[in-house]
Amino acid sequence: MEAKLKDVIRDFPDYPRSGILLKDISPVLMDTGLCEEVICTFAERIRKLNIDAIAKVESSGFWFEPASAQQLNVSFVPIRMSAKLLV
């Protein structure tokens, strides 16, 4: 899995500002087979933890966590940064 992801995830150094390395995962999202494989791999790696929910702080979207939670039949808890909450 790691090699497959390294082949398709693109790096954009110093974007959006100096010192930041942006990892573009859009090629993973556009490949339905690979995207499903990522979700299943993630779910299988955490299945043994016997969790009740998956929570994630949103930074640039919720891409894999809701589907992984569905695979595990557990809740997904999206956590938004206060600056992004609609008031």
Image (spheres, rainbow, N blue to C red):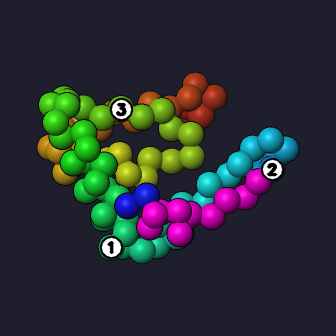
- Magenta span includes 7: yes
Q: Quadrant of the N terminus?
A: bottom left
Instruction: Say whether disc 2 or disc 1 marks the residue closer to the N-terminus.
Output: 2
Q: In x, y percent, where is residue 84?
A: 59, 34
Q: Circle 1 sits on which residue? A: 33
Kind of residue at disc 3:
Ala
Kind of residue at disc 2:
Asp
Q: Looking at the image, which is closer to me, 78 or 40?
A: 40
Q: Which residues are magenta?
A: 3-13
Kind of residue at disc 1:
Gly
Instruction: Say whether disc 1 or disc 3 marks the residue closer to the N-terminus.
Output: 1
| Marker disc for residue 14 | 2
How many marks on residues?
A: 3
Residue 11 position (above or below residue 44): below
Which residue is found at the position 85% from the left and 44% from the top? 18
Q: Quadrant of the C terminus?
A: top right
Q: Circle 3 sits on which residue? A: 55
Q: In x, y percent, where is residue 83?
A: 63, 28
